[in-house]
Amino acid sequence: MVTKQEMIERQLKGRGISDPGVLKAMEEVDRSLFVPEDQQDKAYEDRPLPIGKNQTISQPYIVAYMAEQLQLQKEEKVLEVGTGCGYNAAVISRLVKHVYSVEIIEWLAELAKQNLAKTDYVNITTKHRDGYAGWQEFSPYDAIILTAAPSSIPKPLKDQLKIGGRILAPVGRMNQQLVMLYKTGEEEFEEKTLLPVRFVPMTGRADKGGSYGR
């Protein structure tokens, strides 16, 4: 059985994760609280784990890598699109002022609430809704992170980002790339491709060609 400390040392530090805040967050968040009982002995293995109905919890390395790339700050407000079981939101919450997280699958949104209730993370607000539309009520955001892959980054998410903010998202259907989008003006963005990834496709409006009525 892999221990949390082995995960930190081998899977994270050993693969180049060096941000002290990210490493501390990964150590503070108990991944075993977010996996089913029959997966407890595998909680700190560096791979996705099944959490039911063909859904998974992300591997620790990719959670840490994405958090490190975003260079999150304590005073920032973050939108997460794709709450899943709540693990990624829990990690990010240790690095920022507040996390707002949306999940399109109703039972997953409820599972995340139950999992997060087991913790002391009071700076996370979740909601069951289609992430394509973001969460206008609490915008603009300093950073937006997607845990499911659209074919292109939805315009509503770009609109809800502060100038100077960044969006980190897996983009593509068959051949996905992890992309960082920096907002440099009201309608101006700079894009940086980081690495090939494999995430579940974004569903809802994103799966219907991205049509969106404002």
Image (spheres, rainbow, N blue to C red):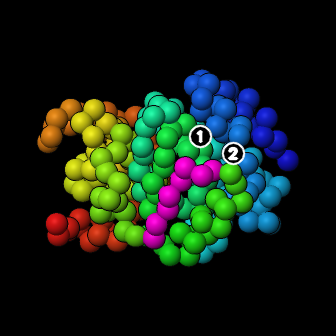
Q: What amino acid is labelled 1 in the image?
A: Arg
- Left or right: where 196 falls relative to 6: left
Image spot of residue 95 (x, y percent): 55, 36
The residue depicted at 69 percent of the width and 45 percent of the height is 29
x and y, in percent, of residue 172 in the image: 34, 53
Q: Is residue 202 above or below residue 189?
A: below
* Residue for badge 1: 94
Q: Determine if the magenta segment contains residue 124.
A: yes
Q: Do the residues under discs 2 and 1 have CB atoms within 8 angstroms?
A: yes
Question: Quick check: is 162 in the magenta stretch?
Answer: no
Going 16% across and 66% down the picture, which residue do you hit? 214
Please give the residue where the numbered disc 2 appears in the rendered image. 29
Q: Residues within 10 Å of mark 1 (few under 14, many from 20)?
A: many
Locate residue 163, reporting x and y percent. Answer: 24, 36
Q: Residues within 10 Å of mark 2 (few under 14, many from 20)?
A: many
Can you tell which of label 2 and label 1 is closer to the viewer?
A: 1
Q: Is residue 32 above or below residue 96?
A: below
Q: Say above or below: 20 vs 161.
A: above
Q: Report x, y in % for residue 56.
A: 60, 62
Please tell me which of labels 2 and 1 falls first in the chain: 2
Q: Residue furthest right?
A: 1
Q: CA distance from mark 2 to mark 1?
A: 9 Å
Left of 50 or right of it: where is 83?
left
At 67% across and 26% down in the image, what residue appears?
A: 14
Image point 49% across, 62% down: which residue? 126
Mark 2, secondary structure of its residue = loop
The front one of 87 and 127 is 127
Q: Which residues are magenta?
A: 121-128
Q: For this view, does 35 lie left or right of residue 77?
A: right
**Identity, as a three-letter code, of the amino acid under mark 2:** Val
